[in-house]
Image (spheres, coloured by chain):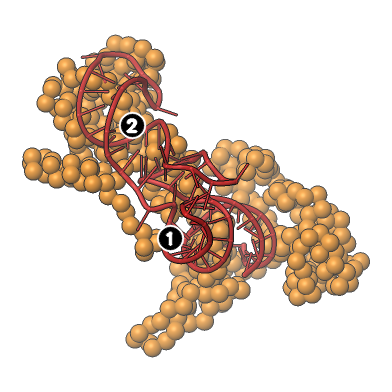
Chain colours: A orange, B red
RNA sequence: GGGUCUGUAGCUUAGUCGGCAUAGCGGCGGACUCUUAAUCCGCAGGUCAAGGGUUCAAAUCCCUUCAGGCCCGCCA
């Protein structure tokens, strides 16, 4: 989310430098640069570099992450989307004028293009021995602090671009997310599912229980809601005769925000005619397993310090059985009042409404309907995990 | 919604049983031609979140407000 009050603090000394460069006729924001190599390509191609400068030259570009100035020579780390590489710049090589220009006007955060030859320093670092520099984009905001980096959680969420600049894990998470979306679409497409874009502005919202965001259409003189789920419209497509439909849907819910809940979030909903929950469970198992395998090349992943195995077949059980296994409570052996009391003994808030809502599972289970994951988690939260290990749910 | 913790220089922070506002990074000036958070010397930089109160004296104690983190509840 973007905070409308967010003010970006331009650094005055940087703005002064931009102005000074303008006055000197230097183009601070040129339109293009003929980059011949990405940083990763250079690092791969010159993995065997020695202390001797390469005969082949390279031309690359990126953002300056740090500069180590040694007087008549300096080192800098240049990074593009693919990787980071060290630059070695000497007054003797690029000339006094260019060298002074760099010292005076180019700083951390700026984008530059460089050409040069590759070698390995005494300390073993693959480095570009630079022979020319072009300023490509002057940064007017300072980069986050070089040693501590950007750790402030609020800032990381509010200013994701900063997080992405300096935290490679975040960049990796974003890459994975993009890949997941592509793979979801490919997986379902290969199985004959069609994706549709259903209305986001809805006159009547439904498909979930949540408070909506409200908007208004001037021409229709009508209140409209941002959808809280795509369900009802996807079902209409099934009514219309499409037998396998899905949507990667952005939904909007006007509710509490925390690290796991955003007012706008994406979900995948799938509808499949002539198939029951057993088929959907099988599809889901295969679907998730395939995604994990394609992205990680493994079915065992570490999440929040816990190893999670996606190896099929997954354990499948009813909500009632889950409560029995993890909380040690047989919900069929107790009255609603007993269940409330048991929940409270475990330090959980629970009234009859909770139990009725959450444990309509009594009837659900009796009819052997699917254990809904959300329902399962809610049930276990309400009745508490006696073993105190909610993470094990992730394996279940 | 309930509980709890936090807010000090551009950033990261010390100081929190009241007594001159700390340091590192960054910035600016200077030295340095193989460094890795380079190093060394110097300088500038503060409405201690905001407002009120107690006190000779408040970053520090009290009250109110604002912003945020974490835990619980709820939703995905």
Q: Residue drawn 16% across and 17% down?
A: A92
Q: Nearer the viewer, residue B54 or A87?
A: B54
Q: Earlier in the sequence, mark 1 or mark 2?
A: 1
Q: Which subunit holds the residue at mark 1?
A: A
Q: Residue drawn 58% across and 73% down?
A: A210
Q: Nearer the viewer, residue A34 or A128?
A: A128
- Measured in 3D between alpha carbons, the distance from the residue under mark 1 to the one under mark 2, in whole angstroms, is 29 Å
Where residue A73 appears, as percent x and y from the top left, is: 24, 19
- Residue at disc 2, secondary structure: strand
When the figure is inspected, residue A306 is found, relative to residue A186, above or below; the finding is: above
When the figure is inspected, residue A15 is found, relative to residue A120, above or below; the finding is: below
Residue receiving disc 2? A66
Where residue B67 appears, as percent x and y from the top left, is: 47, 61
Q: In which quadrant is the N terminus of chain A drawn?
A: bottom left
Residue A38 located left or right of residue A158? left
Neighbor class of circle 2 (other Cα within 10 Å; few <14, some 14-19, many 20+) is some
Residue A79 located left or right of residue A95? right
Q: Nearer the viewer, mark 1 or mark 2?
A: 2
């Amino acid at each position: 989310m973007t905070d409308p009050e967010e003010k970006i603090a331009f650094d005055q000394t940087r703005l002064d430098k931009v102005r000074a460069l303008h006055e000197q006729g230097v183009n601070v924001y040129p339109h293009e640069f003929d980059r011949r190599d990405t940083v990763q390509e250079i690092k791969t191609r010159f993995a065997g570099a020695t202390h001797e400068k390469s005969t082949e030259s390279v031309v690359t570009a990126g953002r300056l992450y740090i500069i180590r100035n040694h007087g008549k020579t300096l080192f800098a780390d240049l990074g593009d989307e693919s990787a980071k590489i060290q630059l070695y710049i000497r007054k003797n090589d690029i000339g006094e004028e260019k060298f002074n220009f760099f010292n005076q006007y180019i700083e951390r955060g700026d984008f530059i293009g460089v050409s040069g030859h590759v070698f390995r320093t005494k300390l073993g670092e693959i480095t570009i021995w630079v022979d020319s520099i072009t300023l490509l984009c002057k940064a007017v905001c300072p980069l986050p602090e070089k040693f501590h980096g950007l750790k402030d959680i609020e800032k990381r969420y509010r200013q994701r671009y900063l997080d992405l600049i300096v935290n490679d894990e975040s960049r990796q998470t974003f890459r994975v997310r993009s890949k997941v979306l592509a793979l979801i679409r490919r997986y379902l497409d290969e199985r004959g599912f069609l994706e549709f874009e259903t209305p986001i502005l809805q006159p009547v919202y439904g498909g979930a229980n949540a408070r909506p965001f409200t908007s208004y259409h001037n021409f229709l003189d009508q209140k409209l809601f941002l959808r809280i789920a795509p369900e009802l419209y996807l079902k209409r497509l099934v009514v219309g005769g499409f037998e396998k439909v899905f949507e990667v849907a952005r939904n909007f819910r006007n509710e509490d925000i925390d690290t796991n809940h955003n007012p706008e979030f994406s979900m995948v909903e799938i509808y499949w005619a002539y198939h029951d929950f057993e088929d959907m469970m099988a599809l889901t198992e295969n679907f998730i397993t395939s995604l994990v395998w394609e992205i990680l090349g493994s079915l065992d992943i570490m999440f929040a310090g816990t190893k999670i195995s996606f190896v099929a077949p997954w354990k499948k059980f009813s909500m009632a059985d889950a409560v029995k296994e993890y909380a040690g409570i047989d919900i069929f052996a107790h009255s609603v009042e007993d269940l409330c009391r048991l929940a409270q003994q475990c330090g959980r808030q629970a009234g009859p409404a909770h139990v009725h809502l959450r444990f309509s599972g009594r009837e659900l289970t009796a009819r052997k309907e699917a254990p809904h994951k959300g329902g399962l988690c809610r049930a276990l939260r309400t009745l508490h995990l006696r073993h105190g290990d909610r993470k094990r749910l992730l394996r279940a």
